[in-house]
Image (tube, rainbow, N blue to C red):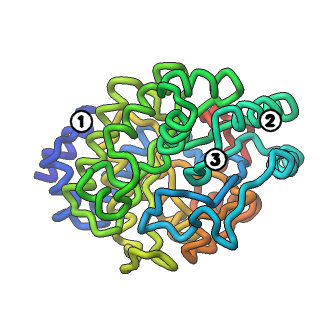
Amino acid sequence: MLKTIARKLDEGRALNRQDALFLMREVDLLALGRLADGVRRRLHPQGRVTFVVDRNVNYTNVCRTGCRFCAFYRQPGAADAYLLSHEQILAKVAELDACGGTQLLLQGGLHPELRIEWFEQLFGALRRQFPGVQIHSLSPAEIIHLAAQSDLSIETCLRRLQAAGLASLPGGGAEILVDRVRRRISPDKIGWRRWVEVMESAHRLGMPGTATMMFGAGETCEDIVTHLLRVRALQQRSGGFSAFIPWSYQPGNTELGGEEATGTDYLRVLAVSRLMLHNIPNIQASWVTQGGTLAQVALFFGANDLGGTMLEENVVAAAGATFRLDREELLALVHEAGFVPARRTTGYAILEEYS
């Protein structure tokens, strides 16, 4: 069966569910890595590994959803609950802009008091003051919450945010796109169809984005494959995903608890993602959850991108993952692996190579 799969890959044909389950369950890890590396080389023959200079600003930790896997959220009224002011956010973005950053990832909880005007005013100020920083912000769950809070349709909400300055959507909150899993780990969060609805609507309006997958929280191989197939099907319809980012659940300080996925689990899921998502050009290694060494290994298992330098990150850190890489460390990591690091935009246009 492995030869049949290899032939499909050579011919550029899409793998099916049976192929994916075989790769997840049966294939030797190194053989799987060689297949994924071959696909990466065909898609990215220049030998580049890309990254973006960005900052994750978590504008609030107040969230009424209460996902069992999240260590970051606080209930409204909690002693350590917060909501950043526009002035505080602008100051953080000024620091990003001063160091040549080009991407702002603004994400928070589902705050019960925020309406769309708060974001319109913020995005307008960001666009005026920092025109070189792309606003790559707000997950589908936040969009649906904001639309409901503001008595708007999803499309109207997206159009207004786009007019204010929102340029692209991150794929946060996807977790596993299987409602049986979602009901167990995040019972009050949107179902998988609503996630797809928001992303497809955004793509239709000309706002591209990324797709993610959080695995290792008790889902099955079948669930992982279903997630990949649903992302692939949406990409086939809309073409709006620039990258896919799998990352492992971090159990520290969470209600859900459990054990963290192993490094070999991560590499297997990453490689299968590269092999299944033939229509998504970039696969991102998550050094934030895996650390620099494993992210370096991931470059030989299908990944061609290392995400952002992340001037700031709070959500994963709240669960106990404290990996950090500055720009020089990231460049060294890529060079040591034998690749050429390249700084990019959110849309993967190359800004600078470091040969």
Q: CA distance from mark 3 to mark 1?
A: 45 Å
Mark identifier at residue 66: none
Q: Which residue is mark 2?
A: 126
Q: Name the element at disc 3.
A: loop
Q: Residues within 10 Å of mark 3 (few under 14, many from 20)?
A: few
Q: Quadrant of residue 10?
A: top left
Residue type, numbered disc 2: Leu
Query: For this view, does 235 lie left or right of residue 3?
Result: right
Q: Find residue 113 and report its horizontal and vertical position in percent.
A: 63, 47
Q: Residues within 10 Å of mark 1 (few under 14, many from 20)?
A: some
Horizontal arrangement in the rendering, residue 61 relative to residue 270 (left or right)? right
Q: In the visual, does 153 lie left or right of 62?
A: left
Residue contact between numbered discs 2 and 3, judged by CB atoms under 8 Å: no
Q: Residue at x 70, y 44 (%)?
A: 104
Q: Can you tell which mark lies on residue 113? A: 3
Q: CA distance from mark 2 to mark 3?
A: 21 Å
Q: Under tag 2, what secondary structure?
A: helix
The percent position of residue 339, horizontal first and vertical second, equals: 59, 53
Residue where numbered disc 1 is placed: 14
Residue 49, position as x, y percentages in the image? 59, 48
Looking at this view, is 208 or 115 the one in front?
115
Judge whether residue 302 can be spotted in this image. Answer: yes
Counting residues from the N terminus, which is met first, the one under dot 2 or under dot 1?
A: 1
Q: Name which residue type carries label 1.
A: Ala
Q: Residue at the location (75% across, 58% down)? A: 311
187 shown above or below 190: below
- Per the model, the C-alpha gap separating discs 2 and 1 is 41 Å
**Can residue 44 be seen here?**
no
**Looking at the image, is mark 3 or mark 1 earlier in the sequence?**
1
